[in-house]
Amino acid sequence: MIRSGPVKTQNENCCKKSDGYLIRVKNSKIEILCRQCRKPTQPYGSGRTISLRHLPLCGKKVTIEITPLRSQCLNCEGNPTTTQQADWYDAKSPCTKAYEKHILLSLINRALLPNPIHIVFNGGF
C-alpha cells in the first residue's frame, strides 16, 4: 500500500447500531500513484472493506468502514497493483491514528497492573 497524500472521503452512509455508530465512507480522490515508479496508475477495482475503530461519539463506539481503491501500473514490469491508503490510518491497524493517540494519552499516569509493588516483592519480573 502507498500513501499518496490525503485521501478525500465523503460520507456515504451512517447508521446507529445498538453499541454505537457505523460510518461508511467512500474515496473521492481517484488518482493513485504506483508504489514503485510513483507515476499515475490505471483503476483496477477495489480492495477489501476495512473496519476501523474511531474516536467515541457521546460515549458510543464509532466504526468507520472504507473500501480502498486499487490500481495497476502499466509502466512497470509485471504491472504491479497498488492499494490506495489515507493518511489517517495505518495499513495493518484496526483503528484510526486519532483513536490510537486517544488511547495512548488516556494511559499516561495510569497503573496497568492492579498492584505492581506486590509483584516486585514476590519475585515477579
Image (cartoon, grey):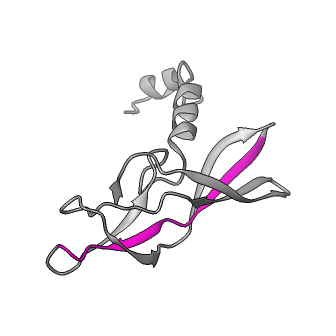
Residue 36 seen from this side: yes
Would you place residue 51 above or below residue 87 in this image? Answer: below
Residue located 51% across and 73% down the image: 48
Which residues lie in the magenta part?
60-75
Q: In the rendered view of the protein, which quadrant contains the C terminus? A: top left
Would you place residue 75 above or below residue 60 in this image? Answer: below
Residue located 39% across and 30% down the image: 123
Q: How far across and down, in percent of the image, does residue 84 sit?
A: 41, 61
Left or right of 28? Residue 12 is right
The outermost residue toward the left is 77
Q: Indicate the quadrant where residue 112 lies.
A: top right
Image label count: 0
Q: In the rendered view of the protein, which quadrant contains the N terminus? A: bottom left
The outermost residue toward the bottom is 78
Left or right of 64? Residue 92 is left
Residue 115 seen from this side: no
Q: How far across and down, in percent of the image, does residue 3 sit?
A: 35, 52
The kind of secondary structure the magenta stretch mainly shows is strand
Q: How far across and down, in percent of the image, does residue 19 sit?
A: 81, 54
**Which of 14 and 12 lies nearest the eye of the viewer?**
12
**Which of 98 and 123 lies nearest the eye of the viewer?**
98
Residue located 57% across and 23% down the image: 110
**Which of 52 and 10 lies nearest the eye of the viewer?**
10
**Which of 47 and 73 lies nearest the eye of the viewer?**
73
Question: Would you say residue 8 sits in the magenta stretch?
Answer: no
Residue located 16% across and 73% down the image: 76
Q: How far across and down, in percent of the image, does residue 54 sit?
A: 63, 45
Left or right of 92? Residue 58 is right
